[in-house]
Amino acid sequence: MSGNPRTIVVVGGVAGGASFAARARRLDEMANIIMLERGEHISFANCGLPYFISGEIRNRDKLLVQTPERFGKRFHVDVRVEHEALSIDRIAKTIEVRDHRNDRIYTQPYDKLVLSPGAEPVRPPLPGIDNQRVFSLRTVGDAQRIRQYVEEHDPRDAVVVGGGFIGLEMLENLTHLGLRVRLVEMADQVMLPLDPEMAEWIHQHLRLRGVELILGRAVEGFNETAEGRLNVSISGEQSITCDMVVSAIGVKPEANLARDAGLETGDCGGITVDEHLRTSDPDIYALGDAIETNNGVLGGKGLVPLAGLANKQGRLAADNIFGRLASSPGVLGTNIVRVFHLSVASTGANGKSLKAKAVPYERSYTHPASHAGYYPGAVPMVIKLLFAPDTGKVLGAQIVGIDGVDKRIDVLATAIYSGMDVKQLTQLELAYAPQYGTGKDAVNIAGYAAANIVAGDVSVFHAEQLDEQVQAGGFLLDVRTAGEFRRGHIEGATNIPLDSLRDQIQQLPMGKTILVYCLTGVRSYFACRILAQRGFQAVNLSGGYMVYCAACPSKCEGIPGLHRWDRALALETFCSTPEERKIVANGG
Ligand code: FAD
């Protein structure tokens, strides 16, 4: 096509870079497309690396989605692996490149330049960080090194530093290899996109799986012991000994090439781009982990290093370069991770960020089943929905469960993208058959709970407000069965099971606020409706005793029933006969 750039150079040949090059070729058969990749591989599956280490993905070649040769041939792209872009001369429109294979430096001209150099693991200058047994994970080579170390040295225990998604995936995979794993995380919770009470589900699940969590502590250094092991010093004068460490404390954008060329970078250290992914130089585009993106809910810029974004931005940058003007939407950061049996996902804003930005919000917690309860294999999930208290506009969602989490988070991400409110969630017509969902799907149910709050059909309070409400004279009412109450309840509560409530209503003090709870918030909602229509002022503990125990773990002996989430799965997965199921259900 005339007017199109003749030579386009892409720096980085993995998620964003390869996606760009393939789309660019589809848009212009004649352009000279050159892909520079510092490493040996292009287009590899970083996201599969932890599973290659444990052998869940057995064959290394499965990680190599494309080889340089196949990609070059299919898309007629000049793929140059082990070629590193060293510097950019924006006036001359050239790049200085080091060809590591032939140990030479050359100058490569470009008409348009696309930067997709990704992000590198953060390796703070701690004593001993360069020890050969302190690993980090970004490339196929890193994964091979970890796997080889495990095979050759048969380590007994490992410390994973950092409880983000790479840290969690690594600790799961190292556990599968038979190692005892401890996790050190500087924050008080793992998975920072979640709010703390939702992360508590993961904490307790990890402990049930034998992982020791050391939260709220920072690693301060590493040193070899006389026995040839590694001593990991942790803030608070604690130190632990292990055979290997995986450091997964986050990534930082590889923005030096751009910065040195005088391109604008932002407060978070990423390359600044406009909605068309153009940098401060109109002939240079940037995308992927290296850029700062606009937050789709809160506004403002931030770093969101996720593969889906990099891939989509690759296509979008190509569209823009070839005259199909396209804008990048605000980023929701939709993510999902498997942590042993749990699936953990979130999208949009969380409570912490809404609070930090002083954005008013309300939240609801629901515990719907993954599919119809009467069909084998149904397991609960917990959905936290964040929404505007006045309009009900959906602002964010977090889900922890075993099954069906992925499709619910994707529906909620789509709802946020479309600007839906919680009432619209109740109206979504979602696929149902007993194996897949419920007549009112989990997303509809989350919508109903939130819409009831917005409509004023029920008032809610939250776990951290409970003490204050009781001190203000509230009467705490537990409407679960007597058996459930005996097994654990909130201190000071009076138990009147829901089905006896109408008969025993005279026991309740009329002038006081009745603070009602049950296990999940459903029975207490029914109770609130009964009480409100009989002249009481009743408020519902959102998410019930389960969320209370997650929000105030020191006041409970674990989130009730969480251990059975594993058991429920085990029942269906591992037992082929009803007899076997009964044995496992009764405690193995
Ligand atoms: P990359 O894919 O990292 O590619 C950048 C490439 O640029 C690198 O290969 C690098 O060698 C090359 N490069 C850098 N500088 C130069 C230079 N000067 N010259 C030449 N080449 C250069 N995301 C998810 O959404 N879901 C997941 O499950 C998930 N799991 C992950 C698991 C692991 C272990 C890791 C490491 C990442 C995971 N990610 C996941 C993140 C995802 O891989 C990244 O968001 C995505 O790869 C970013 O794409 P990118 O093109 O920006 O950078």
Image: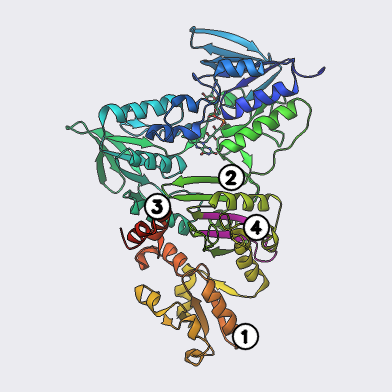
User: Of the residues shown, which amino acid type is indicated by label 2?
Assistant: Gly
Does mark 4's beta carbon lie closer than 8 Å to ligand 1?
A: no
Circle 1: residue type: Gln
Name the quadrant of the C terminus. bottom left
Q: CA distance from mark 1 to mark 3?
A: 49 Å
Q: Classify mark 2: helix, strand or loop.
A: loop
Going from N to C along the chain, the mark reached first, 1 or 3, is 1
Residue to which mark 2 is pinned = 333
The one nearer the camera, 534 or 286, is 534
Instruction: Tell me the residue that label 4 is attached to.
Output: 394
Q: Earlier in the sequence, mark 1 or mark 4?
A: 4
428 in relation to 311, above or below: below
Residue found at x 30% / y 34%: 244
Boundaries of the magenta span:
382-399
Instruction: Point out the residue furthest to the left here.
Output: 226
The amino acid type, in three-letter code, at marker 3 is: Ser
